[in-house]
């Protein structure tokens, strides 16, 4: 029982020490790097085609008869949105 209590106490102490946050965040220490959208799909796939199409046409919405094409288009929109948000944060 003594060992169990000691183990429990040590785990609580280590948990508290491990959960402390630094005074400064990484974002404050290093400039933020924004990654431009990159097509992660294999060339020739429906996903790849949808991604490329969205990159060229920048549509407001993605659609079509092919689910993979639509998903590729949506992936481009997601990456582009994250990139634009990141760039906007750098300007603040």
Image (tube, rainbow, N blue to C red):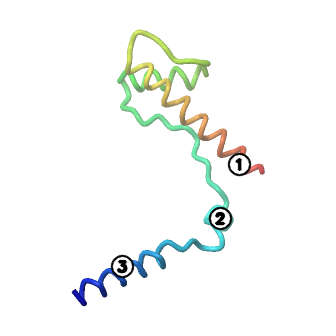
Pinpoint residue 69: horizontal percent, then vertical percent.
42, 19
Disc 2 secondary structure class? loop
Measure the C-alpha gap from mark 3 to mark 2.
Answer: 33 Å
Using residue 43 as the reference point, say whether residue 28 is left or right of it.
Answer: right
Residue beneath the point at 36% across and 23% down: 44
CA neighbours of label 1 inside 10 A, class few (<14), some (14 to 19), many (20+): few
Q: Residue furthest bottom?
A: 2
Measure the C-alpha gap from mark 2 to mark 1.
Answer: 13 Å
Discs 2/1, front: 1
Measure the C-alpha gap from mark 3 to mark 1.
Answer: 38 Å
Disc 3 secondary structure class? helix
Residue corresponding to mark 1? 89
Pinpoint residue 41: horizontal percent, then vertical percent.
39, 32
The image quarter containing residue 7 is: bottom left
CA neighbours of label 2 inside 10 A, class few (<14), some (14 to 19), many (20+): few
Using residue 92 as the reference point, say whether residue 85 is left or right of it.
Answer: left
Q: Residue furthest top?
A: 65
Discs 3/1, front: 3
Residue beneath the point at 63% across and 66% down: 25
Q: Residue furthest left?
A: 1
First in residue order: circle 2 vs circle 1: 2
Residue corresponding to mark 3? 11
Q: Label for residue 30?
A: 2
């Amino acid at each position: 029982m003594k060992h169990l209590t000691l183990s429990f106490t040590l785990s609580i102490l280590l948990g508290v020490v491990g959960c402390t946050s630094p005074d400064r965040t990484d974002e404050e220490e290093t400039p933020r790097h924004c990654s431009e959208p990159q097509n992660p799909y294999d060339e020739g796939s429906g996903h790849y085609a949808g991604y490329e199409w969205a990159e060229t046409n920048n549509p407001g919405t993605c659609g079509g008869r092919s689910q993979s094409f639509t998903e590729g288009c949506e992936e481009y929109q997601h990456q582009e949105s994250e990139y634009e948000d990141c760039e906007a944060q750098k300007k603040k």
